[in-house]
Amino acid sequence: MNGSVIELLRRYAAQQREFGFPDPILPRLEARARPEVNATPSGTDGASGLAEVRRTVDGCARCPLHARRKTIVFGIGDPNADLMFVGEGPGADEDDAGEPFVGPAGKLLDRIFEAAGIARGEVYIANVVKCRPPQNRDPEPDEIAACLPFLRKQIEIVNPKIICALGKHAAQTLLERADPIGRLRGVWYDWEGRRLICTYHPSACLHNASYKRPVWEDFQILRDAYRAIRPL
Ligand code: URA
């Protein structure tokens, strides 16, 4: 094998490891491979695992969204939460702050949390894509595909018992289904051994108040299940 083929194989192996996939091809090149960050968490607690993945995300240029972002909006909250929320992607406020759900949709989400008796700090919140889509357009399938391994790692590390997908992009991405959110919402799914429920995105409620009632119904289902495992 010439040097460039070995280098290509090394890069492939590195990417496999980075995303936590098995590396079936190159175990014998391991010894010679250059040192690099392995995104598979080495610590047992969520915080150190997330910090390791965060380092992998830093400087990410895997999709076109990197070109116009101000910050990477990784995720926030209890790194060992039993309840995790997954939104779509950062808006302008989140791009400024580097934190998910701090803009108008986030403020509504905070009010829903409060009504449901859930503290923002006791859950973990992340998005499907970590960089802001320009003009808040929908994330493209290739952008979602590029970022999804990071979300999957976050879920694996936080290890929530319950996941709530906020809006159609989170719901359709995690469930790998194309159904409209109105058909996906309000019922429990098994998601790789965890319970998953979907609801409308809070920003949908800001544009159309008729979504508020179904969102509140879904949150009550979610809250009851969460409190069953994490009583007050
Ligand atoms: N909308 C999202 O989906 N995520 C955010 O972080 C903010 C708004």
Image (cartoon, rainbow, N blue to C red):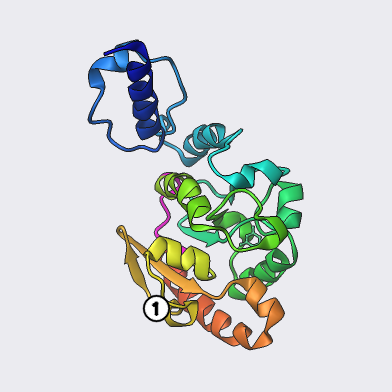
Asked if the stretch drawn in magenta spans residue 53, the answer is no
On the image, the x and y values in percent for residue 131 come to 63, 48
Residue at figure coordinates x 35%, y 12% from the top left: 3
Which residue is disc 1 drawn over?
A: 187
Image height of 1 relative to 101, above or below:
above
On the image, the x and y values in percent for residue 196 come to 40, 66
**Image quadrant in which you'd find residue 216:** bottom right
User: What's the amino acid at mark 1?
Assistant: Val
Report whether the residue tagged 1 is closer than 8 Å to ligand 1: no
- Indicate the quadrant of ligand 1 in the picture: bottom right
Q: Which residues are magenta?
A: 157-164
Asked whether, in this view, residue 92 is left or right of residue 124, the answer is: right
Asked whether, in this view, residue 21 is left or right of residue 119, the answer is: left
**Image quadrant in which you'd find residue 108:** bottom right
Residue at figure coordinates x 63%, y 88% from the top left: 210
Residue at figure coordinates x 50%, y 63% from the top left: 170
* Image quadrant occupied by the N terminus: top left
On the image, the x and y values in percent for residue 15 come to 40, 32
Residue at figure coordinates x 65%, y 68% from the top left: 109
Image height of 1 relative to 214, above or below:
above
Image height of 91 relative to 148, above or below:
below
Label 1 SS: loop
Callout 1 crowding tier (Cα within 10 Å): few <14, some 14–19, many ≥20: some
Asked if the stretch drawn in magenta spans residue 158, the answer is yes
Residue 231 shows up from this direction? no
